[in-house]
Image (cartoon, grey):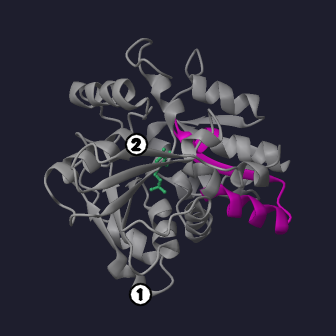
Amino acid sequence: MVLHDLLTQSVPIHALNNVWNKSIWVDVLRIDTIHPIISGNKLFKLSHYVSDAIAKGFDTITTFGGAYSNHIVATACACHLAGIKSVGLIRGEQPDTLSPTLQEAVSFGMQLQFVSRDMYRNKAAIMQQTELADCYWIAEGGYGHLGSLGAASILTIADTLNYTHIMAACGTGTMLAGIIQAALPHQQVIGISVLKGHTGLETDIRYLLPDASQEKRFSILQDFHFGGYAKHPQQLISFMQELWQQHQLPTDIVYTSKLLFAAKTLCEQDFFEPSSKILLIHSGGLQGNRSLPQGVLPFL
Ligand SMILES: *Cc1c(COP(=O)(O)O)cnc(C)c1O
């Protein structure tokens, strides 16, 4: 299996029909099904960075992330599939036992270096460390133009022309910027911010759009972060259990559960015009649920 094969796999659409509002149709694009661990948007976001690194003759890619980071494990996997070395700079002291995410990253050949939380704030200083200065660097979370270019192909892996709205969860906003670029003029793109008070998000997204006319195609909703990044109160866990029991739809605690909750709330509040067709991007990230104690969720 090479990187390109993963990115061109066919991806199912899971119909939720009109569950939350009788005049609104909701479908879920399951890019989480591409791979059980590296599922989802990160592979799309990384694909152009990896080919750029190889084209420019680098032999190592380095990036940043936390102990349960989807981005870290996806970078490790993408580099493994592309035959290039990877280094992960991990926030915090080295633990006695590596998290499942970091074990997986190591199994893909990633070399880990732990960085104290203080140091981690000063990424520029870390990047100048002599032994790392010659690596190809990918920003934390994969933010950047090449990332959004990769994410733009998320809309081409299925027939997405007939949707009036496309919704996705946002961390850095890179995926959303790609989706906005690939969306058609009649489609509205709605981003659900999972960070609390992430007021710079819209500016960060606009910076990645090549064409100012695309700015009208998107909006960001800030009220569905459930307390902040990786915060998962019982209300969110209960909603995830309900989605699984009623629809066999697995979601993750950081991103996709908040997206689905937002979609349900907006449908119930008549936010959309009648006859709207909504496409929710299931961006993956299920591996992050391994930070929960076993048994909390009835799926991974
Ligand atoms: C990283 C991630 C996102 C957010 O992507 P950005 O491009 O940083 O906005 C959304 N969903 C999942 C599952 C992710 O892993």
Instruction: Judge whether 155 appears above or below 265 on screen.
Output: below
Q: Is residue 14 magenta?
A: no
- Residue on which the image places disc 1: 212
Residue at horizontal 43 percent and vertical 45 percent from the top: 15
- Residue on which the image places disc 2: 256
Q: Position of residue 268 (x, y in %)?
A: 16, 49
Q: Position of residue 266 (x, y in %)?
A: 20, 53
Instruction: Judge whether 199 appears above or below 239 on screen.
Output: below
Left or right: 89 as drawn, with respect to 235? right
**Image: magenta residue range:** 45-73
For label 2, the SS is helix
Q: Which mark is residue 83?
A: none
Nearest to the eye among marks 1 and 2: give it: 2
Mark 2: C-beta under 8 Å from nearest atom of ligand 1: yes
Residue at horizontal 36 percent and vertical 58 percent from the top: 278
Left or right: 211 as drawn, with respect to 261? right
The amino acid type of the residue labelled 2 equals Thr
Q: Few, some or many C-alpha atoms within 10 Å of disc 2 (few <14, some 14-19, many ≥20)?
A: many
Residue 93 seen in the figure: yes
